[in-house]
Amino acid sequence: MANQLTGLHHLTAITSSSPRIFHFMSGILGLHLIKKTVNQDDVRTYHLYFTDDMGTAGTDITFFDFPGIQKAQHGNNEIARTSFRVPSDAALTYWIDRFDTYRVHHDAIDELFGAKILRFHDFDGQQYQLISDEHNHGVPAGTPWRHSTVDPQFSIGGLGPEYITTDHYDELVGVMTDLLGFKQIAKEGQYTLLELNDGGHGAQVIIDYQRLIPAAYQGFGGVHHLAFRTDDRDSLQHWIEKIGAAGLNSSGFVDRFYFASEYFRPIPDILFEIATDGPGFLLDETYEEAGVHLELPPFLEDQREAIERNLVPFNTEPQTAGRHSYLVRVF
């Protein structure tokens, strides 16, 4: 699909604790920490990438741990809830039992746009949901992490529909449909379901139209930005030119080493990214070493000593995920 966006690429959120989010994401949710690196724009900050087994685009949620940042307030004009795909309706019952074992707060199973969902949150109040792929089509799910303790038949397979609350409904939906190529495929109450190229859950965004709630502000427990997939640098250049011509506030080309990107704001307070599928996360280390050691892109390697001096080290060997006593508590 040359010069088209093909689905969700990743979502980046903010955590109060990199060690705790490692144990939550890998130990409880069963995601692979495939890259332990730093925020290239603020090297005092870890950047952790959690994915399927091999780091497939569209399966990754990433986290920053900005020093001294405030707790997020959820509200209007934010990327409000992250979805993860699971294979079936039966998987949601499995996850209720698993969440109860680890004392993760969750709601009852619900339904939206014909799909069963299970909402939950982590120790920071970061908002998530599991969504069943029982009747889904489109972008295929990823491969379960081979070292996960989650039953593979119920494992998370990647990102699902991402929720955005806004009172700039017409402006946001206009950018997403007229510029980015989304189609409006359903409405249910205050929710509008948008989709890229018949891509199913791996290519959907849900707009939650809100007019009366207070504004959100960013902090730990909130989302930083949402990224969409494009094939390669040539197609990314197409989007850089297209977004520039639309007059949106944008970054231009950014080389992240593991992929290339452009960042832009469709409306104030919402940050989107367009990112290439490759070259990928195993560019600079083997599968066996992925996520275990601090990896830096070549343009930061000469700063390694200073960077490591400002980071608090923690163990991310796969066998340690989920084994800390603080997991067994009410989040």
Image (cartoon, rainbow, N blue to C red):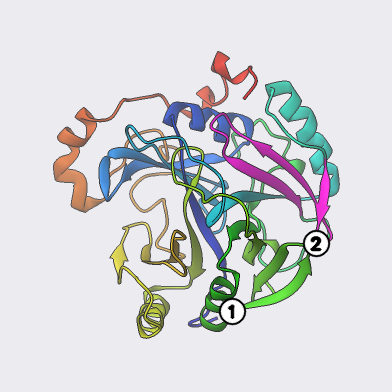
The N terminus is located in which quarter? bottom right
- Magenta-span inclusion, residue 191: no
- Residue beneath the point at 51% across and 49% down: 216
User: Picture coordinates of residue 193 (x, y %)?
Assistant: 70, 67
Distance Cα–Cα, label 1 vs label 2: 19 Å
Side (left or right) of 114 relative to 69: right
- The answer to whether residue 171 is above or below residue 260 is below
> Can residue 295 be seen in the rendering of this structure?
yes
Quadrant into which the C terminus falls: top right
- The amino acid type of the residue labelled 2 equals Phe
**Residue 202, position as x, y percentages in the image:** 64, 62
Q: Which residue is mark 1?
A: 177
Specify whether 171 is left or right of 69: right
Asked if disc 1 and disc 2 are in contact, CB closer than 8 Å, the reply is no
The answer to whether 319 is drawn above or below residue 265 in the figure is above
Which residue in the structure is indicated by mark 2? 113
- What residue do we see at 28% from left, 49% from top? 40
**Callout 1, which amino acid?**
Thr
| Quarter of the image where one finds residue 181 | bottom right
Residue ID at (84%, 48%)? 89
Q: For the stretch drawn in magenta, what is the main secondary structure?
A: strand
The part of the image, by quadrant, that contains residue 123 is top right
* Residue 200 visible: no
Q: Secondary structure at mark 1?
A: helix
User: What range is drawn magenta here?
Assistant: 109-132
